[in-house]
Every structure is written in C-alpha cells, then in structure tokens.
Image (cartoon, rainbow, N blue to C red):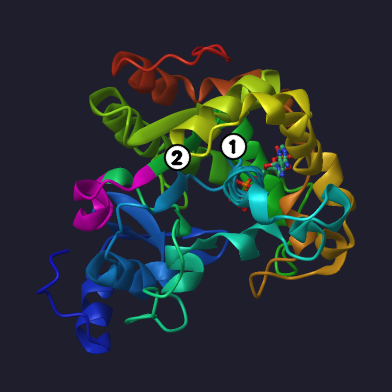
Amino acid sequence: MAASEPTNTTSLDSLRDSLPKELWFGDTLYLYQGFWCFGVLFDPTVAFQTHFEAHDTDIILASLPKTGTTWLKSLLYTIVNRQNLPTISQHILHSKNPHELIQHFELEVYRYDHNRPDLADIPPPRLFATHVPYPSLPDSIKTSKCRIVYVSRNPLDTFVSLWHFFLQFDRIKGTEANAELMEEHLSKYCKGICPFGPHEDHLLGYWKETQKNPQKVLFLEYEGLKKDPKGHLKKLAEFVGYPFSKEEEENNVIDDIIDICSLKSLKDMEINKTGHVFPEVENKFLFRKGEVGNWTNDLTPSMAKQFDQMLKKIKDAGFCSTYYPMDV
Ligand code: PAP
C-alpha cells in the first residue's frame, strides 16, 4: 500500500471487509496482498507498511510463524548485544522472553499505538521482527541498506508445530483427539490458507531476494541451525556485522551463546514457565519439542502426501533444502 493511501479506521475497515476471508481455529484470516492476515493484525500491518522508515543499520528478522522465530530472536539479540551483556548466569534471557527483546512490527510495535510509535530514539542497531512476506514489506526496508535475516522450516514440521500451538488456547483445549479439526486445518495449510501463508510463497519470496542480493537477505534453515549451530552462528554474526573474534572463539563464546539460547535452557527459565508476552499466549506455549522431522508423530503418510504440491512448487522454483527431503 502506498503511503498516500488512506489509513483511517473506516477506510481500513471497508478495505478489510472487501477481502476474501477464511477461518483459522475460529479467527478470521483475510487475503491481503496475496497473504493471509489475521483480522486483528490487519490495521497494525497496514500501519507498519505505511509508516515504518527503515534505517541502514536496522536488522530485521523475518519468518513464518513456528519456523524458529523465538530461537532466532534469542540468538540475534545475544550476538548483537554480547559486549553489553553480563555473564551467562545473569543474561537478560533469564528475565525477558526473546519476544520482548525483539518486537514484531505487526504483533507489537504497530499493534497498540498503531499509527506512529516513536522509534527514532532507539539506538542502532534497531532489531525488529516480522511475519509479513517480502513483497509486502515497506519500500524503505527494500531500498535501504538494512539487513534481513530469514528463517525457514520444513513445512510439515511447521504445520505440526502450529497445530500444537493452537491446541493450547483455552478456547480450543480438549480437542486434541479431534482428527476432523486437524484434517480441516491441514487441508487449509496445504492450500496456502494459514497465518501469513501460503507457506511456499513466503519462503520463496525471501529466498528469491537472497539469490538476487545475499548481502541484504540471509536465508537460514531451522534444520541447518540444529545440525550445525556453530557454523550458522558464525555466519549470522558476520552477516549482521558482529563477527566473532579469534579470542571469542577460543573463549567458547559461541558455545555459550548456543547453550543459553537452546530450547532446554529457555524452556527451563522461570520467565518462560510462567510469563506472558502476548495477551493470549503464555510463554510456555512457545517451547515444545524443537525436533527435526517430528511431523512423523502426528501426520499419517496420506496426510503428509497433501504437502506434495507445495513441496513441488518450492522445488520447481529452484529451492531445494539441504536438510530435508523435498518429497514425502
Ligand atoms: P512463534 O512463531 O510463535 O514465535 P517459533 O518460535 O517460530 O514460534 O516456533 C516455535 C517452534 O520453535 C517450536 O517447535 P516445535 O513445536 O516443533 O517444538 C518450538 O519448540 C521451537 N523452539 C523454540 N525455542 C527454540 C530453541 N531455543 N531452539 C530450538 N527450537 C526452539
């Protein structure tokens, strides 16, 4: 949306109401600019598109929900701020969930003060996150020298993670055994109807940009981070302009960061057992198994088959994961 377009509440309401809609676990998703946006995030998303002015020093984490956002937030924040952080035992992650350290544009920054929150005084580098697909990012992100870190994940594991995430909400609890509900949402997911989906378009949007401009977009895979965390951390630190020195490597700084940001470490922290970042989401909802290939526990072979077309589309566009088979 161009900056000149109206963003007052009435015109936004009529724009939103004119869009195709679908239900996702009882919430309405609207097909906006080719992606499915939660109704409650529609105004904040438009405000982000209209008002955000990127700085060259900004670093933006982009992802689909459930692809490793929380993990990347903890890693990115720690890498960039490591000189100012006290010892690992007093690390800020003990008192703040990663989502408090790096805020999402559409989920937080533009959610409550959604016209023009004052971001100018945040010292560089400003760290933000978004689930918005690449084509719908504000122009200033695309044209400035700010950097984007994208994390992707096997669509089958992503769907299963999303499924378990939504089952934790009070309004849905107790439906675990409801195979029909799972079939319904699986079928939607594979047709592209899911928060910020279609999955394949989201992934390919950022992947194509990394092909064109690897200095601008770093494309990571969750599975790669699990397999070779050290190699990936070095790559990430270099990309964002905070490379590890030889001395840091010798002093095991990379291993310390991997340890404190690990799933077990974050899951065991008191703040993540009891706290709340988002109104409906308890911090503990964000940490489950964190395994690669965990989908085999929840999806039958015929359910998995439904992903074939999506995987084919991704493969046909030229992306092939190094870490998981592109056919099931
Ligand atoms: P979000 O979109 O709600 O922020 P996100 O963090 O992207 O969720 O993804 C959650 C997944 O990452 C969960 O995967 P699972 O359901 O398959 O288990 C969660 O367990 C996993 N996860 C969270 N923190 C970490 C971590 N530190 N290391 C590895 N995986 C993690």
In the rendering, at what x and y percent does residue 185 appear?
A: 55, 46
Reply above or below: 180 against 128: above
Residue numbers of the magenta segment: 135-147
Q: In what element is the residue under mark 2?
A: strand
Residue 266 visible in image:
yes
Residue 149 is marked as 2
Q: Quadrant of residue 217?
A: top left
- Residue 173 seen in the current view: no
Query: Are there few (<14), some (14-19), or many (20+) residues within 10 Å of tag 2?
Result: many
- Residue drawn 88% across and 52% down? 89
Q: Position of residue 75 (x, y in %)?
A: 64, 43
| Residue drawn at x 85%, y 44% as measured from the top left | 265
Q: Looking at the image, is mark 2 or mark 1 nearer the viewer?
A: 2
Which image quadrant: the C terminus? top right
> Which residue is more in the foreground, 167 or 35?
35
Query: Residue 325 appears at what percent x and percent y?
Result: 55, 11
Q: Is residue 192 left or right of residue 72?
A: left
Q: Is residue 258 left or right of residue 323?
A: right
Give the residue drawn at x 70%, y 27%: 247
* Residue 136 lies within the magenta run: yes
**Amino acid of disc 1:** Thr
Magenta stretch encompasses residue 223: no
Tell me the SS state at disc 1.
Answer: helix
List the residue tagged with mark 1: 158
* Residue 311 percent location from the top left of the image: 43, 21
Residue 5 lies, with reference to residue 229, above or below; the image says below
